[in-house]
């Protein structure tokens, strides 16, 4: 929980003294000082602080706001905290082997249209082919996607890219190759650049015959970070 740190950060960001902010919130300076030292405020005061800074209660308590950019903070202030971080999307549906270890599910081209609508369906995920890559760290969740087209040369059409699930989109480094699962455009493999301007990612191909384009973060269902590429055939 980051409430105390966030309260101090937001106060200083507004260039307010404890005395000034306390007066505007209808509190004493001593009370406000206590909140910045981890004293838990009553719920009605939490709401008052949330409304004053135009920050959702969830963001005020759960996010470490000081590590976010000004753009990300402005998006949270506009109520877009889900889109900014990607943290509150859904529980990731996975399959496991007989020993309880996670499988790497494979999403072939012919299954990708179904994936965008059934990615949270346990039966659908369980129906996908699966395999193991023992050399990958075990503290992540992986999925392998078959590539369509030639926009990401030298990775050829039909190759499989194995990726790790991105839980927090704010940590993705600009220029990272990613599988992006979208609501309307299906599954794409691109270099991704965060928050080029308000509410958008920039997606770039390595094949310069394809132009970069913007994708609203509201269109994104999942992001998977490229780890390795494989070329093999599967039978289904």
Image (cartoon, rainbow, N blue to C red):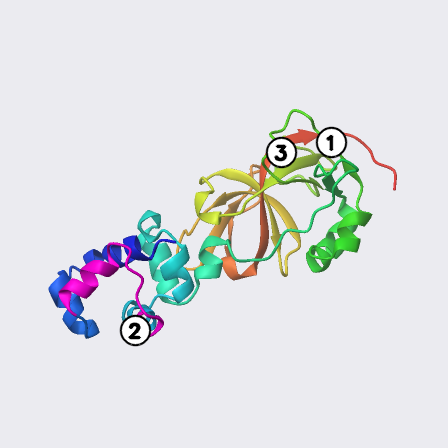
Q: Crowdedness of circle 2 by 10 Å Cα count: few (<14), some, many (20+)?
A: some
Q: How far from the left and from the top, in percent, is residue 8?
A: 23, 56
Kind of element beneath mark 2: helix
Among the two numbered marks 3 and 1 on one chain, the one whose residue lies closer to the N terminus: 1
Which label lies toward us, 2 or 1?
2
Q: Could you tell whether 198 is left or right of 37 in the image?
A: right
Q: Please report the residue visible at 66 percent of the width from the left and 54 percent of the height from the top.
A: 186
Q: Which residue is mark 3?
A: 153
- Residue 159 included in the magenta stretch of the image: no
Magenta highlight range: 28-45
Q: How far from the left and from the top, in percent, is residue 169?
A: 48, 48
Q: Could you tell whether 183 is left or right of 97 in the image?
A: left
In the rendered image, the vertical position of residue 147 relative to residue 71, given as above or below: above
For the residue pair 61 and 225, the one nearer the viewer reads as 61
Q: How far from the left and from the top, in percent, is residue 235?
A: 87, 38
Quarter of the image that includes the C terminus: top right
Among the two numbered marks 2 and 1 on one chain, the one whose residue lies closer to the N terminus: 2
Q: Which residue is mark 1?
A: 132
Question: Are discs 3 and 1 less than 8 Å apart at CB?
Answer: no
In the rendered image, the vertical position of residue 4 relative to residue 99, given as above or below: below
Q: Which residue is mark 2?
A: 48
Quarter of the image that includes the N terminus: bottom left
Q: Crowdedness of circle 1 by 10 Å Cα count: few (<14), some, many (20+)?
A: few
Question: Are discs 2 and 3 less than 8 Å apart at CB?
Answer: no
In the rendered image, the vertical position of residue 79 relative to residue 223, given as above or below: below
- How many angstroms separate mark 2 from mark 1 (CA)? 51 Å
Which label lies toward us, 3 or 1?
1
Q: How far from the left and from the top, in percent, is residue 146?
A: 72, 40
- How many angstroms separate mark 3 from mark 1 (CA)? 25 Å
For the residue pair 50 and 164, the one nearer the viewer reads as 50
Kind of element beneath mark 1: loop
């Amino acid at each position: 929980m980051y409430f105390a740190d966030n309260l101090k950060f937001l106060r200083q960001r507004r260039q307010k003294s404890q005395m000034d902010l306390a007066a505007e919130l209808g509190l004493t300076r001593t009370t406000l000082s206590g909140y910045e030292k981890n004293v838990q405020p009553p719920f009605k005061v939490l709401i008052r602080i949330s409304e004053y800074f135009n920050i959702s209660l969830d963001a005020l308590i759960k996010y470490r706001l000081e590590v976010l950019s000004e753009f990300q903070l402005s998006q949270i202030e506009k109520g877009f905290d889900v889109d900014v971080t990607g943290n509150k999307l859904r529980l990731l549906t996975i399959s496991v082997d007989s020993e309880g270890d996670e499988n790497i599910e494979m999403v072939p081209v012919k299954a990708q249209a179904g994936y965008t609508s059934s990615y949270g369906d346990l039966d659908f995920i369980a129906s996908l082919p699966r395999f193991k890559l023992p050399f990958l760290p075990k503290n992540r969740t992986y999925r392998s996607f078959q590539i369509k087209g030639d926009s990401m040369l030298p990775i050829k059409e039909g190759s499989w890219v194995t990726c790790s699930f991105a839980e927090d989109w704010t940590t993705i480094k600009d220029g990272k190759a990613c599988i992006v699962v979208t609501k309307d455009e299906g599954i794409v493999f691109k270099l991704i650049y965060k928050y080029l301007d308000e509410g958008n990612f920039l997606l770039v191909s390595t094949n310069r015959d394809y132009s970069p384009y913007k994708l609203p973060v509201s269109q994104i269902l999942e992001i998977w970070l490229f780890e390795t590429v494989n070329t093999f055939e599967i039978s289904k």
